[in-house]
Image (tube, helix red, strand yellow):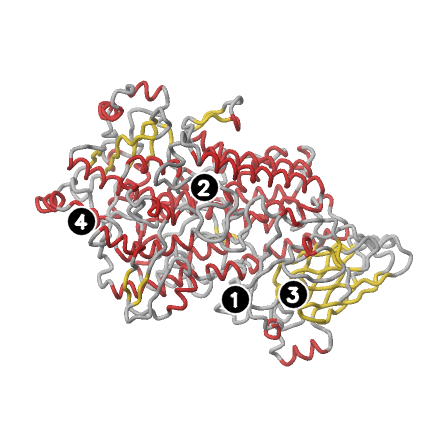
Amino acid sequence: MATQIISSSRLSFCCYIYKHKHLKGTLLQLPLKLPMATQNPEMLQTQFHQPHLGRTSLPHEAVAAGTNSSISVKATVTVKLTDGGCSSCLLGLCNPLDNISDLLGKSLLLELVSAELDPQTGLETRSISRYAHRVGQEDGDVIYESEFVIPGDFGEIGAVLVQNEYRSEMFLKYIVLNGLPNGPIAFNCGSWVQSKFDDPEKRIFFSNKSYLPSQTPRGLKDLREKELANLRGNGEGERKTSDRIYDYDVYNDLGNPDSKSELGRPVLGGNENYPYPRRCRTGRPPCQTDPLSETRSGSFYVPRDEEFSEVKEASFITKTVDSVLHALKPSLETSLLDSNLGFPLFSDIDQLYYQGINIPKLKNPGLLQRILPRLVKAVSDAKDRLLKFETPAMFLKDKFSWLRDEEFSRQTLAGVNPYSIKLVMEWPLKSALDPDVYGPPESAITKELVERGIKGFMTVDEALEQKKLFIIDYHDLLLPYVSKVRQIEGTTLYGSRALFFLTPDCTLKPLAIELTRPPMDGKPQWKQVFTPGLEATDHWLWRFAKTHFLAHDSGYHELVSHWLRTHCATEPYVIATNRQLSVMHPIYKLLHPHLRYTMQINALAREVLINADGIIETSFSTRKYSMELSSAAYDQQWRFDREALPADLINRGIAVEDPSASHGLKLLIEDYPFANDGLILWDALKQWVADYVNYYYKDASMVQSDPELQAWWTEIRTKGHEDKKDEPWWPVLQTPEDLIGIIATIAWVASAHHSAVNFGQYAFAAYFPNRPTIARTNMPSEDPTREGWKRFLDNPDFELLVCFPSQVQATKVIAILDVLSNHSPDEEYIGEYMEPAWGEEPDIKEAFERFSARLKELEVIIDARNADNSLKNRGGVGVVPYELLKPFSEAGVTGKGVPYSISI
């Protein structure tokens, strides 16, 4: 073909396929942009299609105006093939009627829409329709063409309407119009178009140019509003997998009471007892046994264009976690007849990585090998199958590091949960819970005990004055669940807190762990403080106390730092952005990469991770009350105005404002790897957002008068986070500065915050003695029996192994952590890829280039910091270096890389 087309670096989508198990032959692709350095808006080529094309990014000024006579314009349409290249089945040609349509050249109906009103009538200019016919197939794409004759007074072409004449959906990559006086114009579609027999409504696709609502060309205003109305839906009926509707609902589908009454769970959100963010509405019917709960039958709907791409699908399979359970769990439970059986020896834990474990023949070994290609290193052909896990980075560096108190403390600053450590701001420590219910509120951590642990460095008063005491405190959050959790077999729980002292070399020294049991079962409150000790019994009790505290920290990390504060809190942003901001809106284009895949991974979490009897409930300490706990944390702790990194550090007392310091903050713990690296990334991110926002919004009046923007922010507060809508701390949206802060916060949470708490999980927690997810037995010193105490004295190793997760629990969690820590090959890292629309404006393109360059500098800075022997919390012999906020990464489990979005 001799069609003139813009350069490959700005034209194509590298799009991929998702195949539904419930819809044979359907698929999904989401766009993958080329690296920023390859995007060259000046290059023009004459060949239509080339391999490895990036997203389309074409001049938007192409018009048909300015000529007195009609001009001929060729439209070229690119549609993605299915996996395996079976274009016939993809395009509906398995149906004989579609063969006829194709032969007649009536495969796609295109309708060109002018951006301008008719100058004679003041009404919309009449659109021009033509059928596109299939002309060939190239590199996994099917190409269609159509010829248009455009009147000289038609005006700028601002939109294309598309109708799919086939009987199955197709993934439309892009449309290019050639022959216009000012050059070609492209429409980046990147979307599924349903068959007209399923959805007769024509799809609307706008050009790349961004318009604030007040700047929308008059010929496109109605279409802009119509497309938003289509995405909002009417809030009625059950959603179909092909729908593109975004709406809100409460978390009422975590339980399954129709299956078993014990699988019923309370509704999270929409009530005073369990406030919660909102999820995407599915509209499934209510349960028969509990009308407030929604049935879990069928698929977990997400809007069609939110689903995984083929490349990501190949790495994770949409139902990866479900597949792990179905392929692995039954075999484990068959080989381990007692699902509560622990590891007999510590060496048996090591064998998970060295020799593997024997399991019966898998029902579907190919499935397991496909979904866990890296993690499952070998499955033998012998009678018994050998399951072998990849060695975690921490275990590979130093298999005994989990025993060291220094490593226990270091990971509070440079591990997978750096969000819990905070300054001690009140002394003595005291609970805020009702003493009539939970017992005396005073902590058992005394001044004398702390000064004994400090060993002459200073007094407690001096340590408080100099801000040297830090704490991780889960006491009041966990204590209300202790008596309920203890009714469940195979687990236990305490309210807990751990106290640390900041030493002169900027490392933390653990001073004490306090565990508390409230009054229950006719027994009074029990609490005890454990300290690092040299005497054998104290030393072992301290090790048990660390195990319990780390199990609590693991649960808080997964349920609050990770799930609640990133995945769950972000879903309302995704919904509101699609419902209230047109795809033409510059803020939509800024946010779009930060919202990729989040709804799909959240739906998967509801299906198999956070649901009743899912991975979290069966493997973490809080068991069936886990999601209730996250609701309590949302109620007590979550505030949007504290989610940006500087605000978070200040709130935790870790930093104080200091205009003379780097980033405007002074860190009280100077060697705090998460905060040190994070503040550089935050500054770069906020500056990029500021440059972008200030380009489009010159003053406060433009922000205040933008109806889409104001509706977006209002809906986030009053619908997405409805249970907190009346809180006084919500930021106002009146100025460009307000908007910069709001957007930067959302972008930070979706990118850096999520990466910091997610991609190190396998490295630090896959060797579970370092981060057990559950402690199954009480402390040996809690109301000990003579026999129990003797067992502890005679064989503390074995008693600790019994306290650790069972073999089934540990193996399931290891498998899941590998999946969750993995970067897919189509990952889009922050600052590496530029959205096509950003390249349309030279000022925005330059701002992005500065942003990208700053992130490349951060990579170098992190490497230098990790090589600095004076920074004890970043490295050393047998220490995993802190790389979780290095912006870029290769695919796989790498312990680094910051994607734009919460994509896993």
Amino acid type of the residue that numbered disc 2 sits on in the rendered structure: Glu
Instruction: Mark 3 or mark 2: name the one nearer the start of the chain.
Output: 3
Q: Which residue is mark 3?
A: 79
Q: Secondary structure at mark 4?
A: helix
Kindly give the residue lying farthest to the right in the view shown. Answer: 68
Amino acid type of the residue that numbered disc 1 sits on in the rendered structure: Lys
> What whole-number distance in Å separates the C-alpha atoms at marks 2 and 1?
34 Å
> What whole-number distance in Å separates the C-alpha atoms at marks 3 and 1?
16 Å
Q: Secondary structure at mark 3?
A: strand
Q: Could you tell me residue 323's position as x and y percent?
A: 40, 63
Label for residue 883? 2
Q: Which residue is more in the foreground, 853 or 421?
A: 853
Amino acid type of the residue that numbered disc 4 sits on in the rendered structure: Phe
Labels 4 and 3 touching (C-beta < 8 A): no
Q: Is the N terminus in the top left, top right, bottom left or bottom right quadrant? A: bottom right
Kindly give the residue lying farthest to the bottom in the view shown. Answer: 96
Q: Secondary structure at mark 2?
A: loop
Residue at image coords 26%, 56%: 807
- Between disc 2 and disc 1, the foreground one is 2
Q: Which residue is mark 4?
A: 798
Instruction: Mark 1 or mark 4: name the one nearer the start of the chain.
Output: 1
